[in-house]
Amino acid sequence: MRLGGFVIHGNNADTLGACLQSLQAVCDQVVALDSHSTDGSAQLAQAAGVTTGNHRWRGYGHARATAAAMLADCDYLTFLDADERYSPGSAEALLRWKKDGPRGPYFRLLRHDWAELPTGRFRFRPLRQYRLFRRDTAVWTPQMVVHESVPKHFGPGPVLPGVEIDHRFATTLERRRDKEERYALLWAVQAFAHGKRARPSGRQRWAHVTRNALIKGALFRGGRAGWTLSTTVAEYHVRKYVHLRALQRGGHPQLVQAYAEERYEELFRLLDQVR
């Protein structure tokens, strides 16, 4: 069984090296797909000896499909974001999984989101995400412009024990807030195109603050910083429905039209102008 791994990167020279090392430790082939980097990330990937390529940014779905096509000889596919790496011990667990001859169509991995704020470092939350796919079940389409998009037919797949990911989730609250706002508007454009209904914003805020700060424990591990980061992340779920209601009233027609006409590269240019 051949396992292919990939990473989509931009200006990620500070974290890309560890990410590539993680993938190379377990994968038979690794692809690093560069999207407009200017900080030496492309040269770092070339020096690491992985398969490299360039990509004009059209969203996560298009980028992941492009990387997957470059791994055509692999039976299973996995990926890390450029600011992620496998946790200690994960490589050994993943190599055992490969040796046992896996049969499942897809698996979720446990990801730990780490806050590395000026006030200190703490684990913000654990998440279980689809990160390991048999080639014939790995489906990424250009319409999946939002980061967290996965095919709707994926049910609650099994979690692969012992394989975990460390994610550098937040370095400053301001940077995290800006990223959440960008994702919120992009999510709304995609949701509007698919006829999704808006939900009450207030409920979203407190549901997600409670989930991250209390249920997942960010408040207990990070104190005040954990609470503040939880409210920042919860605001994403508020803003995405605020944006969706604005689109339903006729807002941002250029974004809506660009998505509807599958002009995804232009969509991201317009998104930067709006913000």
Image (cartoon, helix red, strand yellow):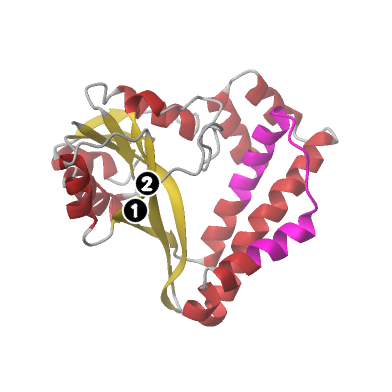
- Screen quadrant of the N terminus: top left
Compared with 147, 205 (above or below) is below
206 magenta-colored:
yes
Give the residues in magenta: 181-209
Q: Amino acid at mark 1?
A: Glu
Would you call the spot at circle 1 few (<14 residues within 10 Å), some (14-19), or many (20 or more)? many
The amino acid sitting under disc 2 is Asp
Whether residue 248 appears in magenta in the rendering, the answer is no
Q: In the image, is residue 12 above or below residue 206?
A: above
Give me the residue at 25% from left, 27% from top: 75
Numbered tag placed on residue 81 in the rendering: 2
Residue, x 75% and y 34% (percent of image)?
252
Q: Which element carries disc 1, helix, strand or loop? A: strand
Residue 248 is situated, as x and y percent measured from the top left of the image, at: 82, 35
On the image, which quarter does residue 85 sit in?
Answer: bottom left
What residue sits right under mark 1 in the picture? 84
Circle 2 — which element? Answer: loop
Q: Are marks 1 and 2 in contact (CB under 8 Å)?
A: yes
Q: Residue at x 53, y 26 (%)?
A: 265
Count residues near mark 2 (Cα–Cα under 10 Å), then give few for <14, some for 14-19, many for 20+.
some
Residue 106 pos. (x, y %): 38, 37
Q: Quadrant of the C terminus?
A: top right
Tell me the CA gap for discs 1 and 2.
5 Å
Q: Depth check: 95 or 59 in front?
A: 95
Residue 134, picture quadrant? top left
* Residue 256 position in % (x across, y down): 71, 28
Residue 229: tell me if it is visible. no
